[in-house]
Amino acid sequence: MQASDSAVRQLGYLVFECAPGVLEAMTVVYGEIIGAAVEPQEGGAVHVRLDGRPFRLRLEPGETSRLAAIGWEVPAPGFDALVARVAATGAALSDPGAEVAAARGAARIMRMSDADGFVHEFHVDLPFAEDAALKEKFVCGDEANGTFGLGHIVQIVGDLPGATAFYTDVLGFDLSDRITWPAADLFFLHCNQRHHTVALSAPAFGMPPGAVHHLMFEAKSRDQVDAAYAKLGALGFPVIMTIGQHTNDEVYSFYMGAPAGYAIEFGFGGKVVDRANWEYKTFDAPSSWGHELQLAPQP
């Protein structure tokens, strides 16, 4: 499906609950290692900004650490049509209300939970001013060469064909490519110029359906990635995979272990998608060099 007003435009935000002690550690990850703007909120929450939007990540205190919501930004003219497609699948949609919408930086919002327990929040963004300093650091949201959104998320799902069909047939994503190797079989999907906003895997890496393997954030320079990598040991965070380069999206990156239970990939130089002319391919290895496994993320 090509880009349209009634399709998901980008990954707008993520909301995480963090177990006691985890939220504080995650602010170090996002602030001191990734270099994002970290801003405390009322009630102990923290907003993480990568651009001018009020937040791209919201961290909330909780009893356990979990992904509480995935925010999908939809253009206002097509919002009702997308919600109608979601409803036609039999999903139970709910309106969390104007107060939640405002807190999310949204004009409209509708919520649903999928079969794996992932909570999806379809929303229309409120306008926000550009943050020039952050725009120089991160590929996020709208750029001169297209729309890229927050980054990407890798989800473990119980029904891989069903989850893929939901993203493509209902939400308007297209398949980018597939990587099949002994450890896993991943499908990569795009909804804008970012090579992939979502990757889907059947249970793998010791992770069950409903788990998040990793999040990816994209820097605007290779030096940012190298500097972040150099800080891991000094700040006490483990390396999941060493610096390397992927076969499919050609990102130069490393993976670190996050106290919240998932990995974080920080990279540079992602391949840009031309949706009108993209050709689907299959790869037999995730990396062309590097990315040596040090330890597995803990589910």
Image: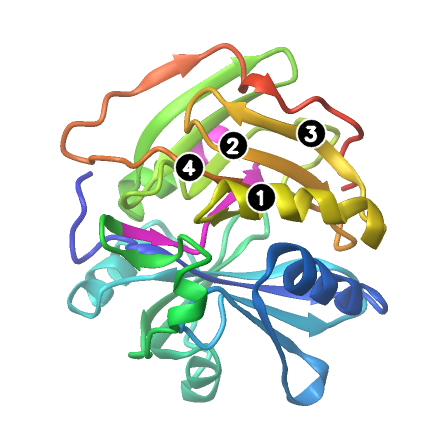
Q: Which residue is mark 2?
A: 252
Find disc 4 in the rendering and name its residue. Answer: 269
Task: Identify the amino acid type marked 3.
Answer: Thr
Task: Check disc 2 and report its element: helix, strand or loop.
Answer: strand
Q: CA distance from mark 1 to mark 2?
A: 8 Å
Between circles 1 and 3, the one closer to the viewer is: 1
Mark yes or no: residue 158 visible: no
State yes or no: residue 148 in magenta. yes
Q: Which residue is mark 1?
A: 225
From the image, tell me which residue sits under label 3.
Answer: 242
Between residue 71 and residue 235, name the one nearer to us: 235
Q: Name the amino acid type tagged 4.
A: Gly
The part of the chain drawn in magenta is 147-164
Vertical relation: 80 (above or below) 45: above
Q: Which amino acid type is marked by label 1?
A: Val
For the residue carrying disc 4, how many other residues have a C-alpha within 10 Å: few (<14), some (14-19), or many (20+)? some
Q: Contact, CB < 8 Å: mark 4 with mark 2?
A: yes
